[in-house]
């Protein structure tokens, strides 16, 4: 095949969708075109890179007006034939013949760089492609915000806005009817959405996978609020929050290539409260509403920077790297490093301390406790105890 002189890059979106994908596609296309690349978009995630190769031309015209559009104009597939994971207790490779097929298509279509936009699963596939010599760069995407190498993934802020808005709405109806409202939000391994939405939306109890909790403490909090003249309570629970036996609530049986579907913990919490306190309790599962719709302005700005800097990585020949947000700048890290561990909420972090200072319960203690380790009050109490002993 005769090599054309024009350089060519491809963009693909892998795994579950999230707000901001189209903003990345638009930014990478615009930056690519301005830097002299031909740009194509791979359809249906990694599936489109395998045979039959499925791609469309991307240009300034057909990426106009998608900055604020949810979803992905390229489509995506979650798991299926392309299911991989490295690090974080899993080592699963995409079958070799599928990867060989992908490499051949990349060569035949004269791609100088492939921008893979995805979460830790898709980035693991991208890493395997890189290890086979495919010129890949990564862009971190997930509403869950659980990729450790970046301060924030795009999509997270939009999901938090959706969940906080739901809490605002639940607040008024909870107060009117003196009810307990339980909001189940996404977050497979982490409680980032629950914590940020809980703070932004005035939650009273936040239950997350990172902090073991007990239903008795949740009930105690509701009782205390009632005693203080607050006859309603807002509870936010992450879908991945663990049950007392350490297990997670799951929805449907899993097939070999599908991830376990989480869900049901919100209803479980609501049922327990209703039964134990005989107080009217309702559960709302926000589900995929968090993944749809327009990205927030923060996400549009972050996605746009990620898209432009993904093209920079290709320009600089930094294959196997992923763009990341190191406030205030966009930087990059090896994808291999990015998929090694998940970002989880640190129970001693300042955001958890702030929440505890507001008497928000994480279900781990029955009563308020001073969260600030260097607090003068605590120091004084310690001295007093010492003097008494
Ligand atoms: O990983 C992001 C996420 O939104 C999780 O929080 C959730 O468990 C999962 O996707 C659901 O994905 P799907 O329904 O597309 O399989």
Image: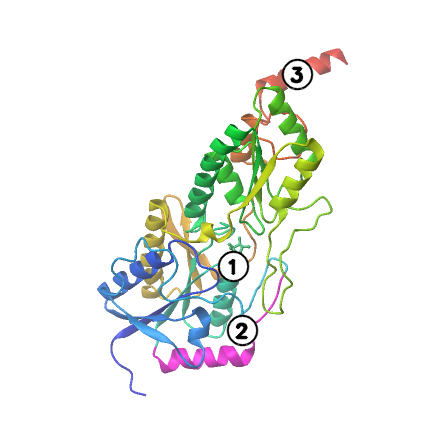
Q: Which mark identifies residue 103?
A: none
Q: Quadrant of the N terminus?
A: bottom left
Left-right relation of 182 to 385: left
Which sits in the foreground, 203 or 24?
Answer: 203
How far from the left and from the top, in percent, is residue 125? 50, 68
Q: Which mark is residue 381?
A: 3
Q: Nearer the viewer, mark 2 or mark 3?
A: 2
Q: Is mark 2 within 8 Å of ligand 1?
A: no
Residue 316 drawn in magenta = no
* Foreground label between 1 and 2: 2
Predominant SS along the magenta part: helix
Q: SS of the residue at dot 3?
A: helix
The residue closer to the viewer here, 247 or 135, is 247
**Quadrant of the rendered structure where residue 273 is?**
top right
Looking at this rendering, what residue extends furthest in the bottom direction?
1
Instruction: Name the residue carrying label 2.
Output: 81
Write the start and end of the magenta stretch as one range.
Answer: 90-110
The residue carrying mark 1 is 120
Mark 3 → mark 1, Cα distance in angstroms:
46 Å
Of mark 1 and mark 2, the one earlier in the sequence is 2
- Residue 360 lies left or right of residue 55; in this view the side is right
In the rendered view, would you say 105 is above or below 36?
below
Residue 74: x and y in percent read 37, 67
Binning the other alpha carbons within 10 Å of mark 1 as few (below 14), some (14 to 19) or many (20 upward) gives many
- What's the distance in space between the residues labelled 1 and 2, CA to CA? 16 Å
């Amino acid at each position: 095949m005769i090599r054309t002189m024009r350089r060519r890059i491809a963009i693909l979106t892998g795994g579950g969708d999230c707000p901001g994908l189209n903003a990345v596609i638009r930014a990478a296309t615009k930056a690519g075109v301005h830097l002299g690349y031909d740009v194509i978009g791979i359809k249906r995630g990694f599936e489109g890179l395998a045979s039959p190769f499925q791609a469309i031309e991307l240009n300034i015209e057909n990426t106009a007006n998608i900055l604020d559009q949810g979803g992905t104009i390229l489509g995506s597939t979650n798991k299926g034939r392309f299911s991989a994971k490295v690090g974080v207790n899993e080592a699963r490779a995409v079958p070799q013949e599928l990867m060989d097929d992908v490499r051949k298509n990349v060569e035949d279509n004269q791609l100088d760089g492939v921008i893979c936009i995805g979460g830790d699963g898709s980035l693991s596939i991208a890493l395997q492609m890189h290890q086979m010599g495919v010129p890949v760069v990564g862009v971190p995407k997930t509403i869950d915000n659980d990729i450790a190498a970046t301060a924030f993934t795009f999509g997270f802020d939009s999901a938090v806005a959706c969940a906080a808005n739901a809490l605002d709405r639940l607040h008024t109806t909870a107060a009117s009817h003196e009810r307990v409202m339980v909001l189940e939000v996404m977050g497979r391994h982490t409680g980032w959405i629950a914590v940020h939405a809980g703070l932004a939306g005035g939650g009273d109890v936040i239950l997350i996978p990172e902090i073991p909790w007990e239903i008795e403490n949740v009930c105690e909090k509701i009782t205390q609020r009632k005693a203080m003249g607050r006859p309603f309570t807002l509870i936010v629970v992450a879908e991945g929050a663990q049950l007392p036996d350490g297990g997670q609530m799951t929805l449907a049986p899993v097939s070999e290539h599908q991830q376990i579907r989480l869900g049901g913990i919100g209803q479980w919490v609501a049922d327990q409260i209703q039964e134990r306190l005989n107080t009217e309790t309702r559960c709302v599962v926000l589900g995929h509403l968090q993944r749809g719709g327009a990205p927030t302005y923060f996400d549009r700005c972050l996605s746009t920077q990620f898209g432009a800097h993904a093209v920079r990585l290709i320009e600089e020949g930094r294959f196997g790297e992923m763009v990341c947000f190191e406030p205030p700048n966009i930087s990059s890290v090896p994808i291999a490093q990015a998929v090694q561990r998940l970002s989880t909420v640190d129970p001693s972090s300042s955001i958890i301390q702030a929440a505890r200072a507001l008497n928000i319960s994480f279900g781990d203690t029955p009563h308020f406790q001073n969260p600030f380790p260097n607090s003068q009050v605590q120091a004084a109490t310690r001295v007093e105890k010492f003097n008494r002993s």
